[in-house]
Image (cartoon, coloured by chain):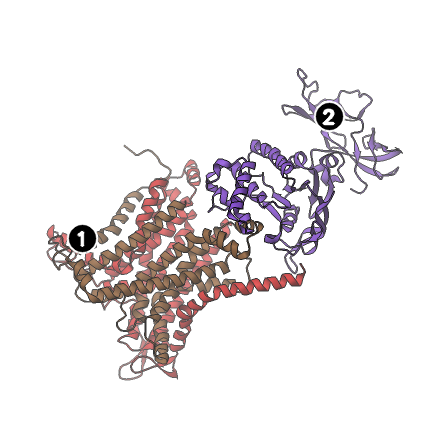
Amino acid sequence: MNEAIGIRDVSKVFGQGDTTFTAVARVNISIRENEFFTLLGPSGCGKTTLLRMIAGFEFPTDGEILLHGENIADMPPFRRPINTVFQNYALFPHMTVADNIGFGLRMLGKSKAEVSERVIEMLRLVKMEPMAGRRTSEISGGQQQRVALARALAPQPKVLLLDEPLSALDYKLRKEMQLELKRMQHETGITFIFVTHDQEEALTMSDRIAVMSKGQVLQVGSPRDIYDAPADRFVAEFIGETNFLTGRVRKIAEETAEVMLEGGAAISATAAGVGVGDDVTIVVRPEHAEVVAVPATGSAVTKGTLENVVYFGTDTHFHVRLPDGSVFVTRQQNRPRLSSEFAVGSEVSIAVAADAARILRAGA
Amino acid sequence: MSQSAIRADYRRTLTRRWLLSSPALLIVLLAATGPLLVVLLYSFLKAGPYGGVLPEFSPEAWIGVVMQRGLFDDTLSIADAHLAIFWRSIRLSLETTLLTLIFGFPTAYFIATRPPNTRELWLFLITIPFWTNLLIRTFAILQIIRNDGTINTVLLKLGLIGEPIRMLYTDGAILAGMVYVYLPLMVLPLYASMEKLDFRIVEAGYDLYATPFRVLRLVIIPLVKPGIVAGCILVFIPSLGAYVTPNVLGGGKNLMIGNLIELQFGQGRNWPLGSALSISLMAVVMAALIVYVRNADKTGGHHG
Amino acid sequence: MAKPFSVKRQRGFTAMAIACFAALYLPIFVLVIFAFNSASSLSHFEGVSLRWFHEAAQNKQVVDATLRSFHVASVAAVIATLVATMAALATTRTRPYPGLTFKYALLNAPLMIPEIVTAVALLIVFSQVKGWIGYTGIGYLIAAHTAFCVPFAYLPIRARLENMDLTLETAAADLYATRWNTFRYVTLPLLWPGILAGLMLSFVISLDDVVITEFVKSAGQDTLPTYMLGQLRRSITPEVNAISVVLLLFSVLVVTLFFFASKRRN
C-alpha cells in the first residue's frame, strides 16, 4: 500500500541554550493511504507536537515530513492539503455553521456556487442540514464537533488530523462519535491521523496505533498486536491492565519457554529472543487468569491471599497478594447464579490460560 | 527548517512587531512622555524675565522648591508657602482617598451583591458619572455649595440659619469636590474585585462562627485587597495633581500643587520653578506607583 | 423583627450605597433643572424655558468651541485607535521579546503622569516649536489629544486580543487562509468590538479634556470645556448649565450605546 505520510528522523526541540526540552526525538513512522492511524500516549508524550508538525503549526528541528513522497517540513500550513479537527473545535464564533464549513474552500478561491454546493454536501454528511444558518455558539457540543469535522473535510484534504476531538464530549456521545468517525473515514477514503490518550478509544477505532512516550515511538502495530504482544513494560502497562511476573527461563522448546517463577511454580510462555537462564518479565492480562481453589489443579501457577473482591456488573475483579508482596489481578466474567465462593483473606491459587502468558523482549 | 532559518524568521517577526508598534510609540514619545525630559532640563535653567528660560545653568529653581530668598537681601529661609501647599495637597489627597474608600466600599459591595439582572443597571449608574465631564461635575458641586447655592437656600428657607454659610473657597469645598468627582474611580476597581468574590468562602466564615463584622474584616476585606489598593492609587494620583477642582472650588487662595505649577507658567513667570515643581510632583506620584506595584506583586504571588 | 440572615448582608451598607447614589445624582439633577430656568439666576427657579439653550446656540464662541471640540476629538480618536490597534497586535500573544516591557510602559505612561505635568511639558515644547516653524494651528491640540488617547484605545483592544482564542487563527491557516486573509476574515472581525470600545473611550476622553487643552491651545482655540472653565471664573449664567446638559446627554448616549453593545455580545 502507498505511503500517505512519512515521518523520517523527525525531532523537535523547544527552547534555546540551557533550557531545552525535546518534545519529539528521532521519530520514524510510515502512515499508509486510507488508514485510520492513531498516535496514543499520555499527556506530554509528544503526540500533539508531532501532529502539529504534520499540520504545519510547528516546524521540526530535524528530519523530514513526507506527503506522498514530497518533503513538506518547511511548507506553511495554508499550503498543505492537510486539515485539522482541533481539540476545542476552534469554530469561528462570528460566522454561521455554513460559513465555517465553507471557509477553507473560499480561501482556496473556489467559486460561490462550488462552495455552497460542497457546503450542502458536507452538512448532509454530518447530518447538520437544518443548522446551516445557526451561529456556532447556538449549537450543542456534539453538533460543534460535527461542524468542525465537516469544516476540515470540506476542502477534501489528503490527510485529516484529529487532535483529541472527542475529549470534550460526554461518555455516550463519545461512543456515538467514535462509530461516526469510523464511518466517515470509510466513506471519504481519506487518511485519518488521530491523537488520543484514551487507550480504549485507540483500540476500538484504529487500523494501526503508534504508542508514544517521552517523545519516542515505542511500538507501532494493529490494536491486536499491541494489546496481545506489547513491546515493553510501558506499552503493556499503558494499554489495558496487566500483571507482571518475574522468573528465570528453564528450557525452551520451539516458540515456548518454560519459566521458573520466583514463587517456585513453573509457567509456559511464548518466547521471543530469550535464552535458557535469562531473567525475564512475564505479562499476563487479568482476563487470561482465574482464581481457583487450593489445592491447585494442573494449570495453577502461583498462590496467594485473596485481598479484595470488586464487583463491576459485567465482571468481578479479584486482587490476590502474592508471596513476593505484589498484587495479581484477575478478571472473571459474571454468570447467572455464580456467587463468589472465595472469602476475602482465604488462600487461593491462580490459574493462567494456556498460551496467555507472554515474555517481554529482553531488556524491556 | 534549519536553526539559522528559524533565527532569521524570528528576527523578521521582531522587526514586523517593532514597525507595527512604532506609530503609537512615536506619538506617545513626542506628545506625552518625551517633553518631560525638556521639563527636567528647564528646571536647571535660569528664568527669563518674561517667562521662558535663559540658556544658563542655575540650581535656583530647585532651591526655590523648598527655600525662599529674602526680598531685600539674599538670605535663604524655608519656603513656608510652598511647603504648606505641598502639605495641603498630600493631606487633601489622602483625605479624598480615605473618604472615597469609606463611601465607595459599601457602594461597590452593594452593586456586587445585587442579583445579576439589576446589577448591570447599578453598574451603569456608577459608570455615567465616571464618563461625565469632570468640569461639569465640579460645576454641579459649585452650584450646590455657593453662598446662594442649593444647600444655603434650603437651610435659609427652613429657618435653620440666619445667613448663608460660607463653604466655597475653603479646603472643605475642595475636599467635597474631589470626593464627589473621584468616587466612581474608587467604586469601579472595588467592584471588579468584589464581583469575583466567591461567597462560598464567606459562607465558610459564617459556618465557623464569625459574626458579620468579623467576616467583613477577616474574610471579605483581605480577599478584595487588590481592588482596594487599585482604587486608592487610582484616586490618590489624580487627586495629587488635581487642577480643575481646586481651581474652581478653592478660588485663587486655596492652592494645590497643580495650581502652584500653573501659576509659575502664568502670572509667576518662573518657568524653571514650575518645571522643578512638576518634577517633584512626578516623583511623589512615582513613589506611590512603586508602592502599588510592590503590593500588586505580593498579592499576585499569593494567588498565583 | 430582625431580617432573616443573609450571607451577603452587611449592616448599613445598603443605606450608605443608596446615599452615595443620591449624592452622585443630586447635584447633576440640580444642574439640569436650572438649565431650564427662565431667569438668569442659579438659585431661584422662576419658570421653565429653553431660553439658555437658545442663547448658547446663538453664541458664536460656544458654537465654534463645540465644533472645535468635536473636530479635535474625532481626529484624535481615529488616529489613536488606529495606531493603538497596530500596537496591540504587535505586543500581544507573543513570548516576551526584547523591548516588550518598554513598549508596555511607554504606551501606558500617559495614564501615570499627572495631567498638569504633561500639560506644562507640552506648553514648553510646543511654544518652542511654534517659534521655530511658525505654525500655530490646531495640529498641536490634535497631537496632544491623540497622545493621551492612545492608552485608552490600547487597553480594551489589547484585552480583547489577549482573550482571543489563538487556535482560531491556527484553524484559519489550516484552512488555506494566507496571513492577510487570516487577519481580514478572522482576527479583525473578532477584534472589532475592542476597536469600537477603544474608539468610543478615546473620543469621550478627548471631548472631556480640560487641563492639557488649556495649556496647549493658542489664542482663539477654545474647546467647549476650556470655554466653560473661562465662564466659571466669571459670573455664571444658566447658559453654562445648558451647555453642560448637552454634553451630559452626549456622554450618557455614548455610554449607553457602549453598555448595550457590550451586553448584547454577552
Position of the N terminus of chain B, as image quadrant, is: bottom right
* Chain for disc number 1: C
Residue A338 in view of the camera: yes
Chain for colour brown? C
**Would you place residue A81 above or below residue C95 in this image?**
above
Q: List the single residue furthest toward the top.
A: A337
Residue at coordinates 48% horizontally, 66% vertically from top-left?
B22
Q: Which residue bears the numbered disc 2?
A: A305
Q: Which of C169 and B186 is in front in this view?
A: C169
Residue B238: image location, x then y, percent: 34, 61
Q: Which residue bears the numbered disc 1?
A: C33
Look at the numbered discs 2 and 1 and tell me whether their residues touch, using CB distance below 8 Å: no
The Cα–Cα distance between marks 2 and 1, rounded to whole angstroms, is: 92 Å
Chain for colour purple? A
Chain for colour red? B
B156 relative to C88 in the view: left or right: left
